[in-house]
Image: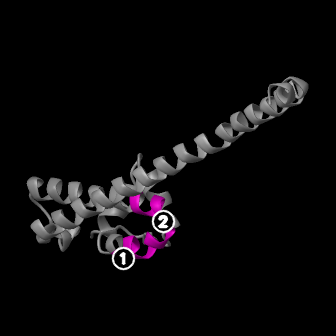
Amino acid sequence: MPDWLSRNAERLGAVSALATAFAALSVLVVVPWQIAAADRIQRDQTAREIYREFLNLTVQKPDLATADYCTLHEPAQIAAYSAYVDYLFYTAEQMIDTSPEWRGPMAAYLQAHMAYLCSVAAGASGGDVAATLADLALTCDPAPACP
């Protein structure tokens, strides 16, 4: 056996170098894939937690889920409703980012709050809102939402 090793040492060294190079190349491919998969799993889990909290908020505050933005007059009501719809919008963005299948359900939630969303989209900082609404095929009427 020692004689065989000494005769084939050069070949074994070459095979060893190839194996090392293959292992290094495998690491360069597998590690980024694993990191991306772990990141995707974490984003999906975070989006589900955000959605769960949105549902919990809706159960706790059904008056916000069914409120008509145009009939709100008290500053506290307007602030609570605005925060609720903003959280709904954030939830929709997170869920759609995880899976396009969420476009329909999120569009249905947002449809009930178009008066508020259109007023935000018409504002100076409403470009992101307008773009997301357009992406969901939700449109604002050219006339003001609240008379």
Task: Give the residue at mark 2.
Answer: 99
Task: Give the residue at mark 1.
Answer: 108
Q: Position of residue 123 (x, y in %)?
A: 39, 51
Vertical order, 2 against 109 (above or below): above
Answer left or right for 44 relative to 30. left
Answer left or right for 21 relative to 3. left
Q: Residue at x 38, y 70 (%)?
A: 106
Numbered label attached to residue 56: none
Q: Main secondary structure of the magenta part?
A: helix
Quarter of the picture containing the N terminus is top right
Nearest to viewer (mark 1 / mark 2): 2
Q: Number of callouts in the render?
A: 2
Q: CB atoms at circles 1 and 2 under 8 Å apart?
A: no
Q: Position of residue 54 (x, y in %)?
A: 24, 62
Mark 2 Cα shell of 10 Å, populated few (<14), some (14-19), many (≥20): few
| Front in this rendered view, residue 8 or 129 | 8
Q: Position of residue 48 (x, y in %)?
A: 33, 61
Report the amino acid beneath label 1.
Ala
Q: Secondary structure at mark 1?
A: helix
Picture quarter containing residue 66? Answer: bottom left
The region drawn magenta spans 94-108
Q: Is residue 85 magenta?
A: no
Is residue 138 visible from the viewing direction of this image?
A: no
Report the amino acid beneath label 2.
Ser
Is residue 58 visible from the viewing direction of this image?
A: yes
Q: Secondary structure at mark 2?
A: loop
Quarter of the picture containing the C terminus is bottom left
